Image (tube, helix red, strand yellow):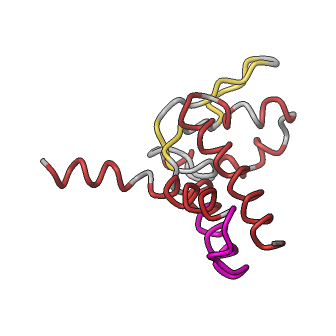
Amino acid sequence: MASRSRSNLWRFWGYGVLALLLLSLGSNAFGPGIYAVLVGLLIFFVLFQAPVYCGAINRRRGADVDFCRNNSTGLILGCHLRQHKWSKLGQEWWSLGWRQKTKGIWTGAAAKLATVSGVVGTVTGIIGVIK
């Protein structure tokens, strides 16, 4: 039972990297190289491993677009369905307007947390590198 809960917590390792970035911002404990590595890890987590909804296009009905609501990992990857794996970077995605493109990154608390973490972590890392 303990190993199952440990594996569930391991899915959120990127938020620990974000906390480390935020806590180290006020001190001079890390050099620019460490900040760059931490930001790289955080961006990798947000884009490929953060637990979020799939958000791939299921079907279009006129101007309305139905998005997939299955669980997936990362803001770029899709769910367990083969057609959804890389569909967020496919041709249909590029033909959508910005409102429809960004709808998937704000669906649900997990996606909002991943998006905000990526932005805050990147800004924090840039500030840390400049310092």
Q: Which residue occupies 55% across, 55% down?
A: 19
Using the image, determine if residue 113 lies above or below residue 4: above
Q: Which residue occupies 78% across, 30% down?
A: 100
State the residue in front, 33 or 28. Answer: 28
Percent x, y of residue 69: 52, 29
Q: Quadrant of residue 45?
A: bottom right
Percent x, y of residue 18: 58, 56
Q: Which residue occupies 34% across, 50% down?
A: 9
Using the image, determine if residue 113 lies above or below residue 69: below
- Which residue is outermost to the left? 1
State the residue in front, 90 or 11. Answer: 11
Give the left or right position of residue 45, taking residue 35 as reference. left
Q: Give the position of the C terminus as an image quadrant.
A: bottom right
Percent x, y of residue 6: 26, 53
Using the image, determine if residue 24 lies above or below residue 90: below
Judge whether residue 73 is colored magenta: no
Region of the chain picked out in magenta, as a range: 26-42
Percent x, y of residue 121: 68, 56
- Which residue is outermost to the front? 27
State the residue in front, 48 or 130. Answer: 130
Q: Which residue occupies 82% across, 19% down?
A: 63
Give the dominant element type of the magenta stretch: helix, strand or loop: helix
Give the left or right position of residue 118, taking residue 64 as reference. left
